[in-house]
């Protein structure tokens, strides 16, 4: 992909935001389409400007970066959030990952590293500062071990899940599978119960993280 990436920068320090904006735009990688100084403002601006990648600080006034990340991805599940923080604390990194962030980069990263991270994040890579990658991998392994007993979905439930990941409405799913909208709702209810999820956006996020939005129909 050679087109410039639509980026939003969220940080409560305007000088820092301006510096990052200048670095990204001068690199030719991105256009900064929005900026925000608080998590609540970030959610509003994201919905207005529809950035592809959000650079998110964690320590923000009023609404934290973790909460803002979660809210943005609830509304825009195909967006990518890359945390750009001064904190290398394990708890901060893992909390960010659990909120749905695609990666975590320390503010000590060079301009070149930041531009490359934005490019890779838009492409779907999980991008982490090397010193933090190990603990994230350990957490993924721990979660994987804990989900080994996850109930299998039926063939029909898997079909429904793939279409949910692709953003189809219940009505559209029913038309594609030649079943009623009510039947689709029942399947989604059963899938949520099996995966121990509660809302449709959580199901969509789960399916996207599994790569089902890119699977053939």
Image: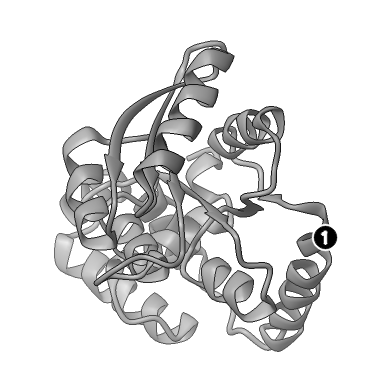
Instruction: Name which quarter of the figure residue 65 lies in.
Output: bottom left
Q: Quadrant of residue 33?
A: top left
Residue 9 against residue 211 in the figure, above or below: above
Left/right of residue 73 with respect to residue 153 in the rendered view: left
Identified at 60% across, 29% down, the residue is: 119
Q: Is residue 9 above or below residue 207?
A: above
Side (left or right) of 34 relative to 23: left
- Residue shown at the point (80%, 75%) measured from the top left: 138
On screen, 195 above or below 103?
A: below
Visual colour scheme: one colour
Determine whether 143 is above or below 4 in the image.
below
Q: Is residue 153 left or right of residue 62?
A: right
- The reply to whether residue 87 is in sight is yes
| Residue 25 x, y percent position in the rendering | 47, 18
**Is label 1 in a helix, a strand or a loop?**
helix
Residue at the spot of label 1: 131
């Amino acid at each position: 992909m050679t087109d410039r990436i639509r980026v939003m920068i969220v940080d409560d320090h305007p000088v820092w935001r301006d510096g990052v904006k200048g670095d990204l735009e001068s690199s030719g990688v991105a256009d900064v389409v929005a900026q925000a100084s608080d998590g609540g403002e970030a959610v509003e601006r994201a919905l207005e400007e529809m950035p592809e990648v959000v650079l998110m600080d964690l320590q923000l006034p009023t609404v934290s970066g973790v909460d803002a990340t979660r809210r943005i991805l609830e509304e825009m599940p195909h967006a990518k959030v890359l945390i750009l923080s001064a904190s290398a604390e394990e708890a901060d990194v893992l909390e960010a990952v659990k909120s749905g962030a695609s990666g975590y980069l320390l503010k000590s990263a060079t301009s070149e590293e930041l531009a490359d991270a934005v490019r890779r994040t838009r492409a779907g890579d999980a991008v982490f500062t090397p010193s933090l990658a190990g603990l994230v991998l350990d957490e993924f392994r721990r979660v994987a071990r804990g989900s080994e007993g996850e109930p299998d979905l039926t063939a029909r439930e898997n079909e429904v899940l793939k279409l949910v990941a692709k953003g189809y409405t219940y009505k559209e799913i029913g038309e594609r599978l030649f079943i009623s909208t009510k039947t689709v709702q029942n399947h989604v209810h059963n899938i949520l119960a099996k995966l121990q999820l509660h809302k449709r956006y959580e199901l969509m996020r789960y399916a996207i993280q599994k790569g089902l939005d890119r699977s053939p129909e």
